[in-house]
Image (cartoon, helix red, strand yellow):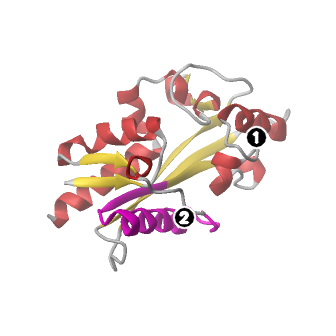
Amino acid sequence: MKLVLASNNAKKLKELDAILAPLGWELVTQGELGVPEVEEPYCTFVENALTKARHASLLTGLPALADDSGLCVDALGGAPGVQSARYAGEPKSDVRNNQKLLGELGENDQRTAHFVAVIVFVRHADDPQPIIAEGEWHGEILRAARGQDGFGYDPLFYVRELDRSSAELDAAEKNRRSHRGQALARLVERLLARR
């Protein structure tokens, strides 16, 4: 079965493909199918993910998968939250987002944070019963970037029990532990149960 991913992020596609492999689905990005990005006007991850999934499904006629995820930093009242990808404004830039985060935290010793992922699957645009799965990954914000892998805030997200940043983890380990990996594992369980 072909499934449209409501994202144009190649790294996210690779991450999701690896986790969804047991289902035998062909995952394609919305950009490959000529679907433009949709506005994400909501203040919650679940509303934004649902909007993206319905939009991609409506314009392609395919089942759709969307996620909305972000970093919530305790000392910043949960920011950048749903604005994580555009924290430093347009155009989107991981480097500028990370610089802004470090600037906002300054010398603050309260550096606890967590990633949140909400994954939504719709069978069609008007699916009255979307499958929604969530995951959280707790850690701390480093004072300087570490590691070369991953994307987004990964170089600043420190996983204490491993003594490494998310950007220092190999893809398989990151997929097992991450917020997105947790949410996708729950989604796969629910999809298999629905078959």
Percent x, y for residue 127? 33, 76
- Position of 89 with respect to 175 (left or right) is right
Q: For this view, does 14 lie left or right of residue 168?
A: left
Q: Which residues are magenta?
A: 40-67
**Mark 1 touching mark 2, by CB under 8 A?**
no
Q: Which residue is mark 2?
A: 48
Which image quarter: residue 132? Answer: bottom left
Magenta stretch encompasses residue 59: yes
Residue that label 1 marks? 110
Residue placed most toward the observer, 97 or 115: 97
* Element type where label 1 sits in the image: loop
Characterize the local packing of mark 1: few (<14), some (14-19) or many (20 or more) Cα atoms within 10 angstroms. few
Question: Residue 149: x percent and y percent?
Answer: 51, 23
Which type of secondary structure does the marked residue at label 2 adopt?
helix
Residue 72 visible in the snapshot: no
Please tell me which residue is depicted at 51% across the width and 29% down the height of the picture: 150
